[in-house]
Image (cartoon, helix red, strand yellow):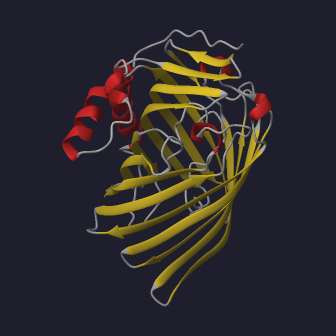
């Protein structure tokens, strides 16, 4: 049996920290000389599956087909707050994923040549009971949506557990916080063509995730992951279509090693409309093949599919503010709901 004893801070504290960090980000980069105007490009939501058993691996945060121009730096501060609640069982297995995950990620990308970029991603994670249960229950009641057992469960608790053949393989019921797995990223421009009323882009992107996070608190997998991804986009004036396909190779980690798949495929597809020079509306699908095997539970062995709806504010001085709500289209393979907020700027 592998236990995960934890102690940490609450998600309420981190909400305040997020607001403070956004202010610091703006103060640091808001007055940089030479800042340009807002961009009208339609760009992807940089979202990931925040399920506790999935988010520890090196899934892509899709930065799209754009490569940072030579000599420029793209900075982003990404916040994801996910509410997990699913209970599943079979003759041999029982799983409960009940809790909230807060992830704050700092992303930096640098254009080192006309076609190439390199970057880093560093997340900070908090696992806890959270505060969203009552809100989600009321939301489901208002719109007549199924509760999936939420009303009978204890509210605002953390309980991640998995048993197979009578053996406890995961038991986590106390909060934690800490640095996650650091990732080094890179990209190479293949196509950047403007003509006949459209703008086409195609880029090859990669990611190497290193085991810097503590796997006993689900802040990391305990192994090295490598991702290769092909990203493309086409924009016709105020309308944009984008997508990606990729492959993820994962070293054996510390969690459910006997059931872990070493390979997974990922993909995304999105559509956006620049409604005004300052506002774009977007809808996006993200999918991943199963990261685990030898299970009859959807939480482990079913492909995931998430739908993100929202938009972006294209602000002066190259600021972009992304706001999205993420739902699990494939039920139980991702959190019930996640809230995404991203602030980025090029300078």
| Residue 218 visible, this angle | yes
x and y percentages locating residue 27 in the rendered image? 35, 36
- 80 is higher (above) or lower (below) than 194: above
Q: Quadrant of residue 261?
A: top right
Q: Please tell me which residue is depicted at 46% across the width and 40% down the height of the picture.
A: 78
Q: Quadrant of residue 287?
A: bottom right
Task: Indicate left or right for 72 with 307 as reference.
Answer: right
Residue at the outermost bottom position: 196
- 59 is higher (above) or lower (below) than 230: above
**Number of numbered discs overlaid on the protein picture:** 0
- 261 is higher (above) or lower (below) than 94: below
Q: Please tell me which residue is depicted at 59% across the width and 34% down the height of the picture.
A: 122
Q: Quadrant of residue 252?
A: top right
x and y percentages locating residue 128 in the rendered image? 45, 19
Task: Indicate left or right for 50 with 240 as reference.
Answer: right
Camera-nearest residue between 188 and 79: 79
x and y percentages locating residue 310 in the rendered image? 34, 54
x and y percentages locating residue 215 in the rendered image? 67, 22
Residue at the outermost left position: 142
| Residue 41 visible, this angle | no
Camera-nearest residue between 4 and 66: 4
Q: Please tell me which residue is depicted at 36% across the width and 29% down the height of the picture.
A: 150
Task: Indicate left or right for 264 with 300 as reference.
Answer: right
Quadrant containing the N terminus is top right
- 194 is higher (above) or lower (below) than 157: below
Residue at the outermost front position: 91
């Amino acid at each position: 049996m592998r236990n995960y004893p934890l102690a940490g801070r609450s998600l309420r504290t981190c909400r305040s920290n997020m607001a403070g960090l956004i202010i610091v980000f703006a103060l640091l980069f808001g007055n940089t000389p030479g800042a340009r105007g807002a961009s009208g490009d339609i760009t992807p939501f940089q979202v990931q599956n925040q399920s506790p058993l999935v988010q520890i691996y090196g899934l892509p945060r899709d930065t799209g087909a754009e490569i940072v121009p030579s000599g420029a730096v793209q900075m982003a501060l990404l916040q994801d707050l996910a509410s997990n609640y699913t209970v599943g069982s079979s003759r041999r297995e029982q799983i409960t994923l009940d809790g909230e995950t807060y992830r704050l990620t700092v992303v930096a990308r640098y254009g080192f040549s006309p076609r190439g970029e390199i970057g880093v991603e560093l997340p900070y994670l908090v696992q806890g009971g959270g505060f969203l249960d009552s809100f989600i229950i009321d939301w489901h009641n208002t719109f007549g949506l199924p509760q999936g057992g939420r009303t009978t469960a204890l509210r605002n608790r953390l309980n991640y557990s998995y048993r197979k053949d009578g053996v406890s393989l995961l038991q986590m019921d106390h909060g934690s916080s800490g640095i996650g797995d650091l990732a080094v990223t890179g990209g190479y421009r293949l196509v950047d063509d403007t003509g006949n009323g459209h703008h086409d882009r195609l880029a090859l992107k990669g990611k190497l995730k290193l085991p810097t996070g503590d796997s006993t608190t689900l802040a990391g997998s305990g192994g090295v992951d490598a991702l290769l991804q092909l990203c493309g986009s086409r924009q016709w004036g105020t309308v944009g279509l984008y997508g990606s396909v990729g492959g993820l190779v994962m070293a054996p980690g510390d969690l459910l090693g006997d059931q872990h798949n070493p390979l997974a495929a990922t993909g995304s597809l999105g559509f956006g409309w620049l409604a005004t020079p300052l506002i774009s509306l977007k809808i996006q699908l993200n999918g991943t093949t199963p990261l685990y095997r030898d299970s009859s539970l959807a939480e482990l062995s079913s492909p995931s599919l998430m739908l993100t709806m929202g938009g972006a504010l294209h602000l002066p001085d190259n600021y972009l503010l992304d706001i999205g709500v993420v739902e699990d289209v494939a039920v139980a393979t991702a959190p019930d709901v996640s809230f995404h907020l991203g602030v980025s700027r090029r300078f």
